[in-house]
Image (cartoon, helix red, strand yellow):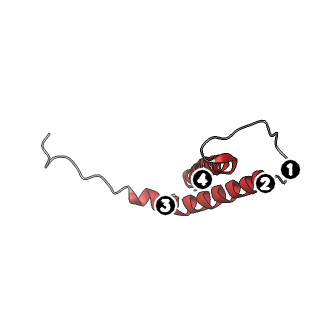
Amino acid sequence: MSDAEIPDRPPSGGLVAVLDVRRNAAVGVASGLALAALVYVVRVFELLGPVGAGRSYPVVGAAGWFLVLGFVLAVTTALLVTTLLTAVRAYRLATAE
């Protein structure tokens, strides 16, 4: 099959727009940052009580390590929320009459 015989592919940007992925990603990032900030504040300011003092946190200290963990929590939550919102939107579009 030559290049002239291969049909053009439809643009995939339409699917992204129909599923509202940009809005879902914005909601996901906002919820991830909010959850990570909340957990970080609770941990650093010991709002639920002190944590055992027997641990050492090398290089950046306890606050630095929890900042890194907060970043991981924010990214993971953002991805999860974005995926769930996009899946719900796709399901609703698929079952709409």
**Is disc 4 in contact with disc 2, using a CB cutoff of under 8 Å?**
no
| Disc 1: CA contacts within 10 A as few (<14), some (14-19) or many (>=20) | few
Task: Give the label, 3 or 1, closer to the camera.
Answer: 1
The answer for how far apart the CA atoms under marks 4 and 1 are is 25 Å
The answer for how far apart the CA atoms under marks 3 and 4 are is 20 Å
Callout 3: SS:
helix
Kind of residue indicated by mark 2: Val
**Which residue is more in the foreground, 23 or 61?**
61
Q: Residue at x 62, y 52 (%)?
A: 74
Disc number placed over residue 42 in the picture, else none: 2
Where is residue 56 shown, x and y percent of the image?
70, 38
> What residue is shown with label 4?
78
**Is disc 3 in contact with disc 4, using a CB cutoff of under 8 Å?**
no
| Disc 4: CA contacts within 10 A as few (<14), some (14-19) or many (>=20) | many
| Disc 2: CA contacts within 10 A as few (<14), some (14-19) or many (>=20) | few
The answer for how far apart the CA atoms under marks 2 and 3 are is 38 Å
The answer for how far apart the CA atoms under marks 4 and 2 are is 20 Å
Answer with mark 3 or mark 1, whichever residue precedes in sequence.
Answer: 3
